[in-house]
Amino acid sequence: MLDRRNFMKTCSGIGLAGTLFPGVLWAQAEAQGAKKITKEMIDNAAVIADVPIADEYKEMMLENLNDQAKGYEEIYKLKIPNSVDPALVFDPVLPGMKFETARRPIRISAPRLPKEFEDLGKAGMRPNYEALAFASVRELAELVETKKVSSVALTEMYLGRLKKFDPMLKFVITLTEERALAQAKKADAEIAAGKYRGQLHGLPWGAKDLLAVKGYRTTWGAGGFENQIIDEDATVVKRLDEAGAVLVAKLTLGALALGDVWFGGVTRNPWNTNQGSSGSSAGPASATAAGCVAFSIGSETLGSIASPSTRCGCTGLRPTFGLVPRTGAMALSWSMDKLGPICRSVEDCALVLDAIQGPDGRDRTVHDPAFNWDANLDWKKLRVGYLKADFERKPEPPQEAPKEEPAKTPEEQKKREEQEKRREAARARAVYDRKYNDAALAKLGEMGVDLIPVELPKFPYDAIRVMLEAESAAAFDDLTRSGRDKLLTSQKDYDWPNTFRSARFVPAVEYIQAARARKLVMEAMAKVFEGVDVIVAPTNGSQQLVITNLTGHPSVILPNGLRGEDAPKYPSNDPSDFQNAGGPGTPTSLTFLGKLYSEAKLLAFARAYQEATGFHLLHPKLEI
């Protein structure tokens, strides 16, 4: 068989190593089991790669394939684990940017408990812990600190709910029951001794199962990794341990952080169990919305906190890139991955962020700005922009379908009809949902907010997004080359196996060009934020999700009302269909975007809107 090392050296010698050509040609040779490269193979590869090659170069390549050199195979032999990041480090901070560094104690909101909780702890009163299932972190913290409820009782209650609702919602990969009960007992003992650690002390939480926890499996939601053990605690897990929080479960994620389909099934939306919970932070959003944890930790690379928070009616925070260490978390895209909280209120997100943010000495992307949460911040002094064009954009009316050749088979005709139904369902949902965006602008006006119209910069974002695809393919390169990608549960055209294979055809030069274009986007977004502190955006607006994940800006996603009984239904009840969303009684959401490392201001403004609307107080009615 051919020696790949020598082959790659030859390609490099004629200036082709950074193009698509070498990989295409090598794949042809391997597929055919060839003992040597032929001119015909070179011609075919050159056509695919759009690289013109003169005949004399072809001869040169054929003559020199046996030259000695190191190449890709030598790197493959290193067996590089997923935890090793590249030497190239993405930094969203541009020259001249400055951040607040002076640290002050956080200022939380005043104690405010629902009436049914006020008498807890009084003589003869036995708490109904089930009634606390949907309480906020702030409320639970008040009850635990004042010893009206115990951490052990809360932990047992949430463990019971996880066991009760998991068969229906499929959000648990592993219960950490023994660890949790030991932590809860320790928390109660410390609080009784006057050693209160802070707002998360004694509160049960759930981790997306891409976070390593010592002694428990870390499956990444993927077939082929069901029994993977990573013998360490992720930094976020360590920090929540230090805060006294109680880990009760490792929760589902779509396989390798895509969607809501994992090796055990499809995680469901508590508001409509015929729908998936969206993803990839599928379990954290579903369990939080269903009142089965006090809060959870998710991750986002391109919508994995925003999308399930929207679908399940949670409040999600995607922090600035480089604020929360990712040490011990599965890597998908080293330049885009972010960890953040999924909660039931904005202030809950702030309290969790305070515990997990800041450098750990291992994740080289993390900066050290101050996060000074102040629940009483005068948000009226903030300059607030809104994406005027996105709010005013009307869904396109139905278009006359372009003339096509008649379907050749009944199956092809059925597929065309299903695609048309999906397009019409998405259009109908967009038409219906517009009133919720209009209502949000009206409410902000009632709050006295003077909205400033802003416009996001225009760039070829889909082309720049190729960086994510190339990085993810590199992170799971061995999976593709070994053929183990077939073990992943979902194998549709938009799933990772197909994306990873396709990404192997991305030229190195084009990856670098995309990175350079990304720098232009960062500079353009910095100019947008020169005039505003916060931007209000439709969650499903044109490009804000892609843009801000590329530039590293933070966002908060919060519930913005429930659809009525007249809401259009999706044509299918298949929960594995990612587009199966919306319909009667399901949540809508609104997004707030902030400047880099400005989470304190961003969250303060989002909290003001949340307090003015109260949509976060609505919860799904679950029955077994």
Image (cartoon, rainbow, N blue to C red):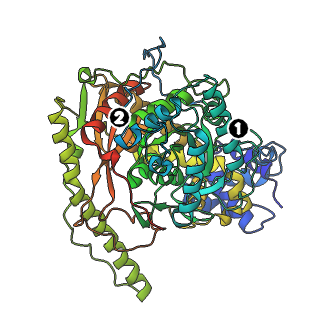
Most foreground residue, 193 or 198? 193
Q: Amino acid at mark 1?
A: Asp
Q: Which residue is mark 1?
A: 233
C-alpha distance separating marks 2 and 1:
31 Å
Residue depth check, mark 2 versus mark 1: number of the one nearer the observer: 1
Please identify the quarter of the rendering in which residue 315 is found: top left
Please identify the quarter of the rendering in which residue 391 is found: top left
10 Å crowding of disc 1: few (<14), some (14-19), many (20+): some
Number of marks present in the image shown: 2
Q: Is residue 42 above or below residue 602?
A: below
Q: Which residue is mark 2?
A: 593
Q: Residue 384's spot in the image, x, y percent?
A: 25, 29
Q: Is residue 216 above or below residue 492?
A: above
> Which badge, 2 or 1, is on the more N-terminal residue?
1
Residue 127, numbered circle: none
Most foreground residue, 477 or 69? 477
Q: Residue 415's spot in the image, x, y percent?
A: 40, 78
In the rendered structure, the answer to whether residue 88 lies left or right of residue 603 reads right
> At x 49% / y 42%, what residue is drawn?
124
Q: Is residue 133 above or below residue 612?
A: below
> At x 41% / y 73%, what residue is drawn?
573
In the rendered structure, the answer to whether residue 266 lies left or right of residue 379 reads right
In the rendered structure, the answer to whether residue 70 lies left or right of residue 199 reads right
In the rendered structure, the answer to whether residue 461 lies left or right of residue 156 reads left
10 Å crowding of disc 2: few (<14), some (14-19), many (20+): many
Q: Amino acid at mark 2?
A: Leu
Q: Residue 70's spot in the image, x, y percent?
A: 80, 42
